[in-house]
Image: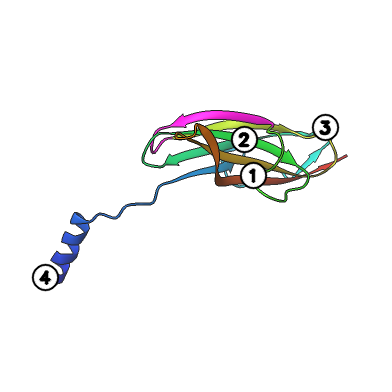
Amino acid sequence: MIVSAFTIGYFIMCPTTQPAYNTIYLLDSQHKTADYPLTLVAGQNSTFNVYVNVENHMSKPETYQVLSKNTPYLTNVPVETAALNTTVITLNDGQSWQSMQTITENQPGSYSVVFELWGLNPLTNQYEFTYNYCVLNIQVVS
């Protein structure tokens, strides 16, 4: 009885804290994690949509950039190529954001579509890579 009272008292006086984090993830057009596009047909079926989701669990408001990029050679992240789309969002702690992104690729080949999450550093007023990203590997056939 004394041990359980001590244990309960400990958890009341010293609550566990979750580490702060942010995240990015993708959902298919049906808002599931099942049917991502894998093969496109150039000139016919060369466009697809995915939902990009960002969550803030940093215990304070955060400003983010979501960059979508397309590359035939994924060697490192962040990808050293121009973004196809850049979206700036500000989220309060615990808040999430979702946006449908449309990607088009008409050139036959293998590609990696990368969605990178960058956070604004308020001290430098520069965006820094958060090491959160998602990759969809697609094949475009003729």
Residue at 22 percent of width and 58 percent of height: 11
Q: Which residue is mark 4?
A: 2
Indicate which disc residue 67 carries: 2
Q: Earlier in the sequence, mark 4 or mark 3?
A: 4
Residue visible at 60% across and 31% down in the picture: 100
Residue 30 shows in this picture: yes
- For mark 3, give the secondary structure: loop
Q: Position of residue 125 (x, y in %)?
A: 50, 31
Closer to the chain start, of discs 2 and 1, is 2
Tell whether label 2 touches label 4 (CB within 8 Å).
no
In the image, is 40 to the left or to the right of 94?
right
**Which tag, 4 or 2, sits closer to the chain's start?**
4
Between 21 and 137, the one lying in front of the other is: 21
In the image, which residues are magenta?
84-95
> Residue at label 3?
44
Q: Earlier in the sequence, mark 2 or mark 3?
A: 3
- N-terminal of the pair, mark 1 or mark 4, is 4
Cα separation between marks 4 and 3: 72 Å
Quadrant housing residue 16: bottom left
Q: Quadrant of the N terminus?
A: bottom left
Q: Is residue 1 visible?
A: no
Q: What distance separates the C-alpha of mark 2 from that of mark 3?
A: 26 Å
Give the label, 3 or 1, closer to the camera. Answer: 1
In the image, residue 46 lies at what x, y percent? Answer: 78, 34
Circle 2: residue type: Leu
- Distance between mark 3 and mark 1 Cα atoms: 30 Å
Quarter of the image holding residue 50? top right
